[in-house]
């Protein structure tokens, strides 16, 4: 009854339970944090807007991204994945989300940043609907925890417009 | 009269031997009672001895019987407790499948393509709701012709106006390019049916148990054997 294996099993079970409880508490503590991130997104320049040989429109643009995501970092946050996506609707598609830039913020010290960049991923439409298209720029963040639940949210900034003609 | 007296005395003195000294006149009756008692005790003793003899006679058979019944009981008990362990694990797994709506609610990360977010050996909890898939979500998807599902992030979504079907493009955070090279030959987009679930929770390191056990099956068998022994031996 009180063999070595039996005791080892009991100790192991107990320690696993304690560890699980601590992990759950760490994850729940994230709910106590009410983040207040800010973001400014600006299209500095439309480099070009062209129709690919296969008929899809593609645009290249330069973005100015500045954000303060420091409040997202709790003690349970391992990193914050942040990305900027263009969102627009066409007659064919109810929603198009195209990621333009992303980055990994490893710590709170790097969470306040300003960056000027060309789009990292290609901005291609399914079809040729990009001329004169209104679109939103959305800054998404994905808080990846040390343990537990992942948190996702975004800031939508509306009112961007692509040029009427191919350039 | 005498009997009443005797009773009274007995009550006062509390014992038969005292009666003899205090009330000699009633000796006959007094003696009668002890003799009866003796007779009674004799008969008891005899019975006990008889019983002992009977027991001695069938000692081997009886112990065999008791051992046999005990063993059957024990074996049944162990079978039941083993069954309880197996079924409760099954209940938890199937229950998770029902709650999360994903056919594999817990997955282990095998590659480093999502580092530093997810490392090899981390565990992800999946959820598959009716909600449409959106950019930024980490999804687990199956590609035709690949046995092992992949965990990557959605970077592009195109959702149809009329049918609501989605075209999804994924990329590993740690990979340089998108996943089109990983997809089946000529496949440009993932559809809804490729996606097994989206990651909602994260637990580090726990998946190493699974990885070690699948890569070194001997450890698995040793562990299962040890656990089985533990269940069998820990009867009380």
Image (cartoon, coloured by chain):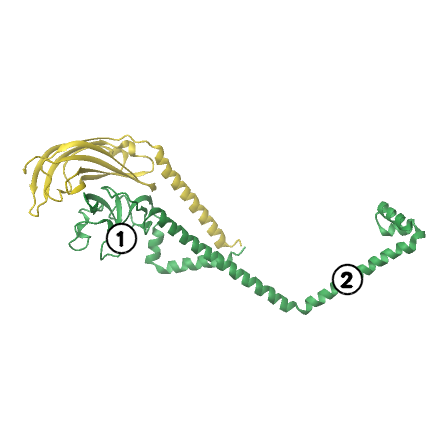
Chain colours: A yellow, B green
- Count of numbered circles on the image: 2
The image quadrant of residue B155 is top left
**Image side of residue A76 versus residue A85, left or right:** right
Q: Circle 1 marks a residue in which chain?
A: B
x and y, in percent, of residue B139 in the image = 26, 46
Q: Are marks 2 and 1 in contact (CB under 8 Å)?
A: no
Q: Which residue is mark 1?
A: B149
Q: Circle 2 marks a residue in which chain?
A: B
Q: Residue at x 88, y 47 (%)?
A: B9
Q: Please report whichever mark, 2 or 1, sits nearer to the chain's N-terminal start.
A: 2
Residue B232 can be seen in this image: no
Q: Residue furthest right?
A: B25
When the figure is inspected, residue A64 is found, relative to residue B152, above or below; the finding is above
x and y, in percent, of residue A6 in the image = 49, 53
**Image side of residue A75 versus residue B134, left or right:** right
**Image side of residue B102 versus residue B172, left or right:** right
Given residues A119 and B27, the one toward you in this image is B27
**Image side of residue B224 versus residue A41, left or right:** right
Q: Quadrant of the C terminus of chain A?
A: top left
- Local crowd size for mark 2, using a 10 Å CA cut-off: few (<14), some (14–19), many (≥20): few
Q: Circle 1 — which element?
A: loop
- Local crowd size for mark 1, using a 10 Å CA cut-off: few (<14), some (14–19), many (≥20): some
When the figure is inspected, residue A102 is found, relative to residue B2, above or below; the finding is above
Question: What numbered label is drawn on residue B87?
Answer: none
Q: Are marks 2 and 1 on the same chain?
A: yes
Q: Which residue is mark 2?
A: B45
State the separation of the CA atoms marked 2 and 1. Answer: 80 Å
Q: Residue at x 6, y 47 (%)?
A: A53
x and y, in percent, of residue B75 in the image = 52, 61
Q: Circle 2 — which element?
A: helix
């Amino acid at each position: 009854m009180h063999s070595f294996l039996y005791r080892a099993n009991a100790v192991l079970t107990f320690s696993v339970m304690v560890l699980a409880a601590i992990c759950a508490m760490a994850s729940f503590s994230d709910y106590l944090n009410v983040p207040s991130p800010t973001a400014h997104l600006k299209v500095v320049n439309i480099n070009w807007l062209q129709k690919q040989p296969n008929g899809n429109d593609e645009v290249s643009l330069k973005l100015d991204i500045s954000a303060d995501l420091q409040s997202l970092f709790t003690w349970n946050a391992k990193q914050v994945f942040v990305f900027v996506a263009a969102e627009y609707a066409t007659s064919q598609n109810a929603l198009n989300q195209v990621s333009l830039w992303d980055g990994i913020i490893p710590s709170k010290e790097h969470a306040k940043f300003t960056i000027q960049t060309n789009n990292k991923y290609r901005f291609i439409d399914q079809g040729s609907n990009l001329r004169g298209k209104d679109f939103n720029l959305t800054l998404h963040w994905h808080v990846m925890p040390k343990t537990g639940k992942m948190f996702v949210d975004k800031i939508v900034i509306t009112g961007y417009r692509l040029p009427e003609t191919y350039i | 009269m005498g009997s009443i007296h005797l009773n009274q005395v007995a009550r006062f003195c509390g014992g038969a031997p005292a009666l003899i000294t205090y009330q000699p006149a009633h000796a006959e009756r007094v003696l009668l009672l002890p003799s009866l008692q003796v007779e009674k005790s004799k008969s008891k003793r005899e019975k006990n001895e008889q019983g002992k003899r009977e027991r001695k006679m069938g000692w081997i058979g009886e112990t065999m019987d008791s051992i046999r019944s005990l063993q059957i009981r024990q074996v049944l008990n162990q079978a039941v407790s083993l069954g309880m362990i197996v079924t409760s694990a099954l209940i938890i797994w199937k229950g998770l499948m029902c709650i999360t709506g994903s056919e594999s609610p817990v997955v282990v990360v095998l590659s480093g393509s999502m580092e530093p977010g997810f490392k090899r050996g981390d565990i992800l909890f999946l959820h598959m709701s009716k909600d449409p898939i959106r950019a930024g979500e980490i999804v687990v998807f199956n590609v035709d012709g690949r046995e092992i599902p992949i965990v990557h992030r959605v970077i592009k979504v195109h959702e149809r106006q009329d049918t609501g079907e989605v075209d999804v493009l994924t990329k590993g955070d740690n990979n340089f390019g998108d996943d089109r090279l990983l997809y089946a030959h000529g496949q440009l987009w993932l559809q809804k049916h490729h996606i097994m679930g989206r990651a909602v929770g994260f637990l580090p390191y726990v998946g190493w148990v699974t990885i070690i056990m699948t890569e070194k099956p001997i450890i698995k068998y040793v562990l299962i054997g040890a656990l089985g022994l533990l269940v069998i031996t820990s009867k009380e």
